[in-house]
Amino acid sequence: MKISEMVDHNTKIVGIIGHPIKHSFSPMMHNLTFQNQKLNFIYLPFDVPTSHLNEALKCMRVLGIKGFNVTLPHKEKIIQYMDHVSEEASTVGAVNTVVNEGNQLFGYNTDINGIVETLNPYLDRITKSTVSVIGAGGAARSVIYALIRNFKVEKINLINRTLERSDSIKDYFKAKMHFDEISNYELMAKENVEIFQSSNLIINTTSIGMLPNVDDTPTDFDAAFNNSQIVFDLVYNPIKTKFLKLAENKGATVLDGLKMFVVQGAKSFELWTGEIMNVESIYNELKTKLSQAAE
Ligand SMILES: NC(=O)c1ccc[n+]([C@@H]2O[C@H](COP(=O)([O-])OP(=O)(O)OC[C@H]3O[C@@H](n4cnc5c(N)ncnc54)[C@H](OP(=O)(O)O)[C@@H]3O)[C@@H](O)[C@H]2O)c1
């Protein structure tokens, strides 16, 4: 259907704010679903640098934007501008979905749904285990929250380029969730090989390896991996990152970021429209597109 046949004065606008924004597949996922499910909505990308975040949110209210996703680097900073924040998003300290209800902005975190649904099939292998989390941004916060709440993990190794940031997450979860078993380490340190080796689950929550930087990886020591591990990369473009390829070569169970991406999007979609997204069909459609793009 042409855009001139889709958009009229009743069309509700949703979107995504981040900086940069051009890497995001969210506009494609949501617009395809609106079209497939015949909903009078349109999803737009808004490239907003941090210096303009507050002003952009004022505009969202004035323009009656129905809701939006939040991506890097705003997930943590945006909380201060919300009128209401869900209990989960408040505990995590990161918002990825906003609903504008009568000019009041409600903040939610649907990344948690995506993480839990991706890891749930491996519940027995993850519960009470040792996990290494690479990265200390908004996505890492959601991962750590889910690991503590849903999987009752025993120990978390937090590995990040900037130690101050991982220090502050460590203190944050000690205070918020009374979880003391977080140790933090610098990215690319040689001793990380042993830390990874002793982990049952390793999760990359950084953007390292994301298109176009497909030759980058948060660790290039393939001795880090073994066949009893689960290795999860939140990056979904490309579907199989260099990090996952290294782990797969060593026999690890590998999980890409696409399921998480579709599940978090479906939950946001539900919050804006009250409708259920056909997750399986959109997952298959995106997987085909991403696989074709990688060829
Ligand atoms: N699959 C999904 O549904 C899904 C959902 C959410 C997020 N994600 C992905 O997760 C990633 C992180 O998102 P976020 O919201 O957490 O971003 P963020 O808050 O900006 O945090 C980015 C993290 O990546 C690290 N990092 C970035 N570039 C790096 C580099 N070149 N070398 C070393 N470390 C680097 C940062 O380290 P410093 O602290 O040192 O800067 C930080 O830990 C993105 O790729 C995003 O697309 C995927």
Image (cartoon, rainbow, N blue to C red):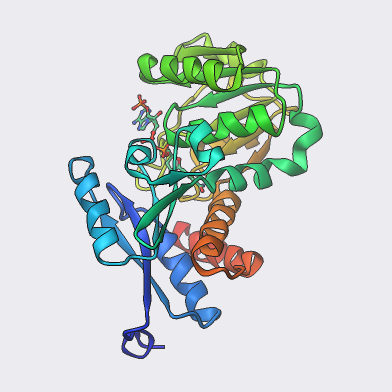
Q: Is residue 213 above or below residue 23?
A: above
- Seen at 51% across and 58% down, the residue is 268
Residue at image location 27% in from the left, 48% down from the top? 20
State the image quarter where residue 60 is shown: bottom left
Extreme-right residue of the structure: 124
Q: Residue 14: horizontal and vertical position, in percent?
A: 38, 65
Name the residue at the bottom extreme: 5
| Residue 135 in the image: above or below residue 271 | above
Closest to the observer, 99 or 192: 99
- Residue 55 placed where, x, y %? 19, 50
- Residue at the limit of the structure toward the top, as seen here: 191
In which of the image's four quarters is ligand 1 placed? top left
Q: Quadrant of the N terminus?
A: bottom left
x and y percentages locating residue 192 in the rendered image:
53, 14
Q: Residue at x 39, y 40 (%)?
A: 75
Q: Is residue 204 above or below residue 72?
A: above
